[in-house]
């Protein structure tokens, strides 16, 4: 039986492991943290569960290729209850507010009532979102393994839609927003996603959520990843936690094993790395195997920025729970980190009873989204010794705004945790504290990497960085693709779980 070492026990690692176990391989997942899950995680503080990931999971609609993978890997099962958020976001300006509704008719009506001067553009926008309801990434097989028939099938089913994908990839949300006359609509559309995202990313997300293909599994991120771990282990897979890989053992340009931080060596026929790609290329492979596509992205931060954030996690009395779940606030008291931020996101986790600490309180995450520059600023604070102090300052400022909103219970709201980009760097070895892959900007090229590194045999890169711009669907797809590539190279027919 051939052995495969999988570095990283996140969504990509479990997906690769599950399909490989099913196909007769002996696999081991090596995860640096004591709890598996990677970026798809949750943790406890002060008696509260803090969900660290899923705001929306696409691929929940039955019958889609992506849904099949979620079912195959145990991420979802027939009994998984889903929560569908009707009011995706309430945006509060100084004296007005606007809601992004999941229901597109309601959304169109709300926007037109708010900005009748933009009626034509609003209708065009909603029409565009509708187009993306039917656009699905090909998830059954990687393009490098597709035959002519597969490619024809995609061209036939997706041909017309591809035009819209390409066209809207080359426009940033900010530039697109300029066609609206109303300044608040411009702000809403321009800043709905994090900085630099292209229009396609926003349309894809809104399209899928509005088509009931984007929901949140009840039980949260940690429960989902635990189901994946259980499925993997039930197929005979082994996982070792709290073990960091430091090196790849290579002989004659063939990967043969890994070295752990404690010096232990493990050998295998194949190695898959699902770690953040820069860590893999530079730290694990020592920079000896450059890759054109990844290096171009790593070196060009302007066109390939990352997405990160600073969050203060607030424990609040449950009474604030019947307010909106996702609020974006344009504040006249900006918070300064690497720059002044006047848009703050507050997300209340009260929608899921299983995520609450008790009936008395709920968790609200107050977040400032940003890019590489926010990471560099926090990194500098670590170096000059003011990191803890600055974390407290930013958290206190976010807390003060929350108290101002909920004056009646202000004295009962407290900060229970703070997360910065440095947290993600330390926890995941991620680039600049990123929690997704490279952002898909209007200037950046789209990526579907084969995972193969030129000149290095029996080694594959998988994980969210291989499919722009990351997220749970690319992570799980990349894990399946890695398993398919190994079967292909070993001349084994890939056995698909739900088709057997
Ligand atoms: C706050 C937040 C919200 C998010 N919201 C969403 C959302 O709503 N929808 C969505 O689709 N996605 C969302 N994401 C993104 C999603 O979580 C990720 O895209 C996905 O989990 C990435 O999975 P992965 O397996 O590719 O990578 P990772 O989760 O990063 O897994 C890689 C694993 O490798 C381990 N590792 C790294 N280096 C080593 C080493 N040297 N040795 C051993 N192990 C190592 C890491 O610890 C990690 O567990 C969110 C993420 C965050 C943090």
Image (cartoon, rainbow, N blue to C red):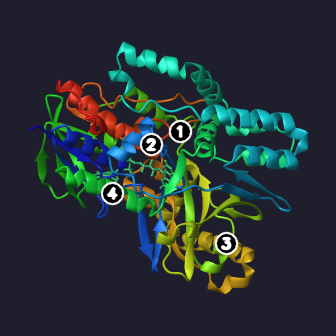
Picture layout, residue 120 above or below residue 328: above
Q: Residue furthest right?
A: 117
Q: N-terminal of the two: label 3 or label 1?
A: 1
Q: Position of residue 182 (x, y in %)?
A: 86, 44
Which residue bears the numbered disc 4? 227
Query: Is ligand 1 closer than 8 angstroms to the Cβ of mark 2?
Result: yes
Q: N-terminal of the two: label 3 or label 4?
A: 4
In space, the residues marked 4 and 1 are separated at their CA atoms by 36 Å
Which residue bears the numbered disc 1? 301
The quarter of the picture where residue 408 lies is bottom right
In space, the residues marked 3 and 4 are separated at their CA atoms by 30 Å
Nearest to the observer: residue 436 or residue 319: 319
Picture layout, residue 432 above or below residue 197: below
In terms of secondary structure, where does tag 2 sit?
Answer: helix
Which residue bears the numbered disc 2? 473
In space, the residues marked 2 and 3 are separated at their CA atoms by 31 Å
Which residue bears the numbered disc 3? 322
Q: Residue at x 28, y 42 (%)?
A: 16
């Amino acid at each position: 039986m051939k052995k495969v070492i999988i570095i990283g026990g996140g969504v990509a690692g479990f997906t690769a492991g599950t399909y490989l176990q099913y196909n007769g391989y002996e696999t081991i997942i090596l995860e640096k943290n004591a709890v598996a899950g990677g970026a798809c995680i949750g943790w406890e503080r002060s008696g509260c569960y803090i969900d660290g990931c899923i705001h929306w999971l696409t691929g929940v609609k039955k019958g889609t290729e992506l849904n099949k993978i979620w079912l195959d890997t145990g991420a979802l099962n027939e009994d998984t209850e889903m929560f569908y958020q009707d009011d995706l976001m309430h945006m509060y300006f100084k004296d007005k507010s606007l809601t992004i509704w999941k229901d597109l008719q309601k959304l169109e009506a709300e926007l037109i009532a708010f900005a009748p001067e933009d009626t034509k553009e609003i209708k065009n926008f909603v029409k565009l979102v509708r187009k993306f309801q039917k656009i699905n990434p090909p998830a059954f097989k990687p393009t490098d393994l597709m035959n002519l028939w597969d490619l024809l099938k995609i061209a036939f089913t997706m041909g017309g839609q591809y035009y819209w994908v390409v066209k809207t990839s080359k426009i940033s949300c900010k530039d697109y927003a300029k066609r609206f006359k109303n300044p608040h609509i411009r702000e809403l559309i321009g800043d709905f996603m994090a900085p630099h995202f292209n229009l396609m990313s926003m349309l894809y997300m809104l399209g899928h959520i509005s088509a009931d293909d984007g929901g949140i599994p009840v039980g949260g991120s940690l429960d989902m990843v635990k189901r994946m771990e259980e499925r993997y282990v039930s197929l005979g897979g082994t996982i070792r936690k709290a073990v960091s890989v430091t090196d790849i053992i290579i002989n004659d340009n063939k990967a043969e094993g890994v070295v752990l931080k404690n010096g232990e060596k493990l050998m295998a026929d194949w190695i898959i790395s699902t770690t953040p790609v820069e860590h893999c290329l530079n730290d694990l492979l020592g920079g000896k195997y450059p890759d054109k596509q990844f290096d171009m992205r790593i070196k060009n931060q302007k066109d390939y920025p990352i997405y990160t954030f600073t969050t203060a996690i607030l424990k609040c009395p449950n009474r604030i729970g019947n307010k909106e779940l996702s609020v974006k606030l344009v504040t006249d008291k900006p918070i300064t980190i690497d720059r002044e931020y006047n848009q703050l996101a507050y997300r209340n986790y009260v929608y899921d009873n299983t995520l609450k600490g008790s009936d008395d309180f709920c968790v609200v995450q107050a977040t400032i989204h940003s890019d590489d520059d926010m990471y560099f600023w926090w990194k500098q604070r670590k170096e000059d010794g003011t990191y803890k102090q600055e974390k407290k300052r930013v958290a206190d400022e976010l807390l003060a705004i929350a108290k101002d909103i909920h004056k009646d219970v202000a004295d009962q709201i407290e900060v229970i945790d703070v997360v910065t980009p440095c947290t993600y760097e330390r926890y995941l070895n991620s680039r600049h504290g990123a929690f997704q892959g490279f952002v898909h900007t209007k200037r950046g090229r789209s990526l579907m990497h084969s995972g193969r590194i030129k000149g290095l045999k029996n080694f594959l890169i998988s994980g969210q960085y291989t499919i722009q711009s990351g997220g749970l669907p690319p992570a799980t797809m990349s894990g399946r693709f890695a398993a398919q590539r190994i079967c292909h190279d070993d001349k084994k027919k890939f056995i698909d779980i739900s088709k057997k």
